[in-house]
Image (tube, rainbow, N blue to C red):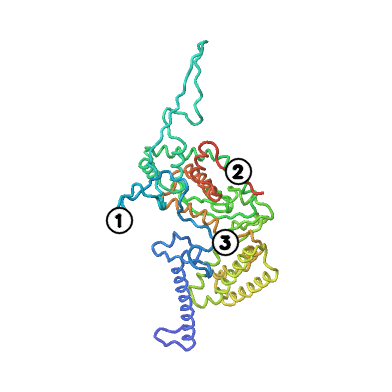
Amino acid sequence: MTAAGARPSYDELVALVAAQSKQIELLRAEVAELRRRLGLNSSNSSRPPASDGLAKPAPRSLRQASGRKPGKQPGAAGAELSQVDDPDQVWTHYPHTCGGCGGRLRDALVARVARRQVFGLPEIHRRVSEHRIVSCRCGCGTVTTATAPAGVNAPVQYGPDVAAVVVYLAVAQHIPVARVVQIVTDLLACPVSTGWVATALARTATALTGFRARLRDALGRATVIGFDETGARVAGQLRWIHVACTPRLTSYHLDDKRGQSAIDQHGVLPAMTAGRTAVHDGWMPYLKTCYDTVEHALCNAHHLRELTGWAESSPDRDAWAGPLMALLREGHTLVQKAIAAGRDRLPAQVLTDLHHRWEQAIDTAYAANPPPTGKGRGKILALIDRLRGYDAQIWRFAHDFTVPFDNNQAERDIRMIKLQPKISGGWRTEPGAHTWLHIREYISTCRKNGIHTLKALRDALTGNAWLPPLPE
């Protein structure tokens, strides 16, 4: 220890410089990490798009250029407006005078007729159907009353078509109840109350009991199911909504928890058996040993976003992150080309080469990112550890073409749940949230199967809800 007023020795100065250099390195690392965090958004990390705020970046796809021109591709089905053969109304317009000599054309021969059609809407007005329930007195003195048609229970009521429109607006289009009332009153001349809208939603959810049983049965037979979850406000509290889905089916579950207990309550993943595949983002509760009986596939869109984030945070990191991203994209392209060619697998040598280069790229990543001093391995090594430790789950899409490259189906199905609170606010009651989710999974499943939404809702309200076909 240097005495007060004495000059430090050479050794003391060296120790001081070494300590300061170490402190500077720590501060540099901290600044670099803070800058990296500031640069994170939904396009280069697992952060949700809602977290981008006003600084939302321009849309950027993780897909590579396909070489095709923008717009409709040759041979693809179009969606243009075309003339119909049986128009509802026809007006014929004749010329009155000749454009050459000016003579009248009353008795002139028709040279040709050009058809032009205008698509419009009929005048919207409510239609009232009256049912007269007749009572007759028999000679014995007994008065017998006719039975009213099913669903006709009150002196005045709205029919299932009005209720279907209300449910469609509130659930399919996420319109707040008060605005649904205004729309139905203005457009359909059917003044309803917010209470009636709530009753229509509850009636629809109750009518879907058989659909939910069939949905669970269909999911129980699906070979590949995607899973995801998101937070939502219900009755002022943070709750979790889980989704289990396929390209044809959608099932939602509301729970207090996000982890294993909620997954078990949903019941889809625990019921899956050996040989079936669960696709998810790698959140650890999905990977617990109790679910080891099924295969797992990880979402590679998440990996591409994370690797992009690290590559963008520092140019030297692209040297190890870039090859990993390129390999994932190459594998995806090879699978897409194989499917387009009618093949159901990649050649064994191609798979061996992909895995060999993947291992080499992981080794390079480890070499470029030595373990940090102190406790923990840091976020970069946590990512690299996952890419090596779960390589079978990451590359399952290349071994089994029924498994998708990403978990986009589940993310699309959960995205609509995230939109609901933004547009209409959170659910005020738990029964209201359950009602909305039951209807939403019905609408989502119908749309995936090409079933007209309004017709499906009306059929449900009249006791004939559409049921998804069971996989063979």
Identity of the residue drawn at 51% across and 10% down = 139
Callout 2: few (<14), some (14-19), or many (20+) C-alpha neighbours within 10 Å?
Answer: some
For badge 2, the amino acid type reads Arg
Q: Marks 1 and 3: CB-CB under 8 Å?
A: no
Sequence-earlier tag: 1 or 3: 1
Q: Nearer the viewer, mark 2 or mark 1?
A: 1
| Residue at mark 2 to residue at mark 1: CA–CA distance | 74 Å
Question: Could you tell whether 469 is left or right of 137 in the image?
Answer: right
For badge 1, the amino acid type reads Cys
Q: Give SS at disc 3.
A: loop
The answer to whether one can see residue 192 in this image is no
> x, y (%) of residue 260?
59, 53
Q: Nearer the viewer, residue 75 or 46?
A: 75
> x, y (%) of residue 4?
40, 83
Numbered badge on residue 101: 1
Q: Nearer the viewer, residue 229 or 356?
A: 356
For badge 3, the amino acid type reads Asp
Callout 3: few (<14), some (14-19), or many (20+) C-alpha neighbours within 10 Å?
Answer: many
> x, y (%) of residue 368?
57, 77
Q: Which residue is mark 3?
A: 406
The answer to whether one can see residue 348 in this image is yes
The image quadrant of residue 59 is bottom left
Question: Could you tell whether 112 is left or right of 411 in the image?
Answer: left
Q: Nearer the viewer, mark 1 or mark 3?
A: 1
| Residue at mark 1 to residue at mark 3: CA–CA distance | 72 Å
| Residue at mark 3 to residue at mark 2: CA–CA distance | 27 Å
Q: Give SS at disc 1.
A: loop
Sequence-earlier tag: 3 or 2: 2
Q: Nearer the viewer, residue 98 or 117?
A: 98
Numbered badge on residue 214: 2
Q: Give SS at disc 2.
A: helix
